[in-house]
Amino acid sequence: MMQHPTRTDAKIGVVNGFRGIAILMVVLHHLFIPYAAKDPLHAGQLDPNGIFAAFIANAWLGVPLFFVLSGFVLYLPYRLGRRNIESLADVRSFYLHRAHRLLPLYYVVVLVTLTLHAQTGVGSLRWYLEAGGLLSTLFVFSPHGFMPPSNMVLWSVAVEIWFSLLFPVLIIAIRRWGIGTVVVAALVACSIFNFIGGSIPVANIGSFRPFTNGIFGSCYQFVLGMLVCDVYVRHLENPKRPASSLPSLLSGLVLGGFGLYLTHHAPWLAVRVLGGMMFSMASSLFLFGSLFAGSLFRSLLEIWPLQLLGCMCYSIYAWHGIVMNDMIPPEASMLADTMRLLTPFTFLTLALSALSYRYIEFGHVRDWKALFLIAPVRPAPSTSVHSPVLIVPAEEPGMR
């Protein structure tokens, strides 16, 4: 846990709530996309023109929302001056901290994946190649291995790891040129990579995913989260400055809807790329507006079950693919099978994730009640006599 000074009406519990929404979107997408995709594995199971099918087809957008939230949370202690990157020792400390946060659970899940769902026999040359790609995260630079067939959800964790490697460079660039310049550069560079990746056909895949979905094409989403963090802290530092909550929320809704329309219906690739980027911008606007929204709106995002799902999102994301492939394999399961097994799938995934969250992610934390938001965290003394203290979540991977 970490602390930061803030106004009492701008709670970071909103971030946990958004994480909870994002993980629900992603899990539902993976469960029901075999019946709702444009070319579904099992046609006729869902009305392709229905509202639920449309939601499922777009629920993968929980991934860019995760990346925006990750950029926000990761940048927050540096924007507040709680941490700095000014020397090689600072960079080394940051990498050690992020490795401790991301890699233990990732490696456990990779080993379980290779044991249960490896595409080739254990010990074969192809098995070692797959293991090497997963353990090193280099598979996200391969057009055919970008989404590992043994556990496709691991791609976004790998992208998160590569963003962590890039993060100190971004901090230095922001200090030298300003965050506005870095945001513009990221948007331009990533749009180019998305356009090039979308222009390269890959057999049985579609596009060149290392460019369209990898760190090359997704980095701007993290940077947008950093921008929201910067503007958020500026408002906290100047309480008299009005926060544009309603305009931000409305602008986010309009921009997001327009971006989705362009993504699905624009005839030119460049415009579809723009539509995808507009959705991430809309997520950023909606996040900022929610941070300063009224108590009623925030209370909806801060309800305990949603916040708890947000806190546990890394473990839920890491394990749900393995549980799904064992209980409800997409290739063999009809919609009736998914509905029949939905309750045991949910129970097993949550139970496994709770254990993972408690003992792998935060095994060093003694206060388990605080981890599960059952009891409040006891705040440490504030470093500022002028600002109240609010506990906010530790740095989390943005999933997926």
Image (cartoon, rainbow, N blue to C red):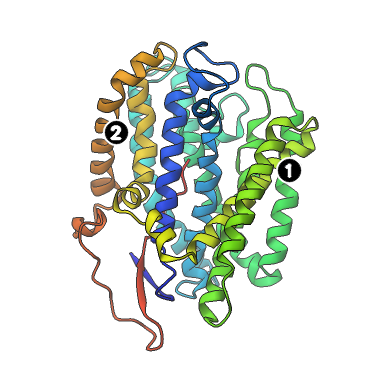
Instruction: Indicate whether 43 appears above or below 264.
Output: above
Q: Which mark is residue 274?
A: 1
Q: In terms of sequence position, does the residue under pointer 1 or pointer 2 come before the other?
A: 1
Residue 89 seen from this side: no
Q: Which mark is residue 349?
A: 2
Looking at the image, is 36 positioned above or below residue 157?
Answer: above
| Tags 1 and 2 touching, CB below 8 Å | no
User: Residue 231's x, y, as percent?
Assistant: 59, 69
**Label 2: few (<14), some (14–19) or many (≥20) C-alpha neighbours in 10 Å:** many
Q: Residue at x 52, y 63 (%)?
A: 75
The amino acid type, in three-letter code, at marker 1 is Leu
Q: Is residue 356 left or right of residue 249?
A: left
**Cα gap from disc 1 to disc 2, whole angstroms:** 36 Å
User: Helix, strand, or loop for circle 1?
Assistant: helix
Number of marks: 2
Image point (37%, 49%), residue name: 310
Could you tell me which quadrant the N terminus lies in?
bottom left
Q: Secondary structure at mark 2?
A: helix
Label 1 Cα neighbours within 10 Å, binned few <14 / some 14-19 / many ≥20:
some
Identify the residue at horizontal 49%, vertical 53% (top origin).
70
Q: Is residue 198 above or below residue 377?
A: above
* Numbered circle sitting on residue 220: none
Residue 160 position, x and y percent, is 51, 46
Residue 5: quadrant of the picture: bottom left
x and y, in percent, of residue 262 in the image:
72, 37
Where residue 292 appears, as percent x and y from the top left, is 50, 67
Is residue 360 found left or right of 135 in the rendered image?
A: left
